[in-house]
Image (cartoon, grey):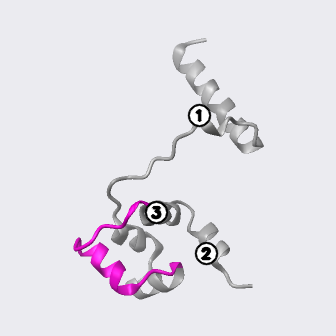
Amino acid sequence: MSEVGEGILRGLEQALAFIEGTADESQYVVHIPPEIDIKAIRGRLGMTQQEFADRFDFNINTLRHWEQGRRVPDGTARAYLRVIDREPEAVQKALRVA
């Protein structure tokens, strides 16, 4: 098998182990980007600033400051925003009041 093929197979085996819960989690690193385009995330979701702030529990003024570049979200907020960007339905489901 070629080196590329082996790499693909290794990646598939790792993905399967992760899904099955048998992966060694100490081998994985979470990447939190130093910058995040909040306005683009909001735009992909088709939300106004107010809707986005209300839906994901952000202070509207903080959201505006982030989008205008006056402030930068901290690491925790960037991680949360990344999850919103990748899995907005899961976040909304988790935040839904019973």
Find residue 27 and name its label: 1
* Above or below 13: residue 91: below
Residue at 51% from the left image edge and 66% from the top image edge = 84
Q: Is residue 69 magenta?
A: yes
- Foreground mark, 2 or 3? 3
Q: Which residue is mark 3?
A: 76
Badge 2 vs badge 1, beta-carbon distance below 8 Å:
no
Q: Secondary structure at mark 2?
A: helix
Residue at 46% from the left image edge and 63% from the top image edge = 76
* Above or below 25: residue 98: below
Find residue 92 and name its label: 2
- Between the residue at mark 1 and the residue at mark 3, the CA separation in whole angstroms equals 21 Å
Residue 39 sits in quarter? bottom left
Residue at 58% from the left image edge and 26% from the top image edge = 8
Horizontal and vertical percent position of residue 24: 67, 35
Badge 2 vs badge 3, beta-carbon distance below 8 Å:
no
**Label 2 crowd (10 A; few <14 / some 14-19 / many >=20):** few
Q: Which one is earlier in the sequence, the residue at label 1 or at label 3?
A: 1
- Foreground mark, 2 or 1? 1
Name the amino acid, label 2.
Answer: Gln
Q: Which stretch did the figure color magenta?
A: 56-75
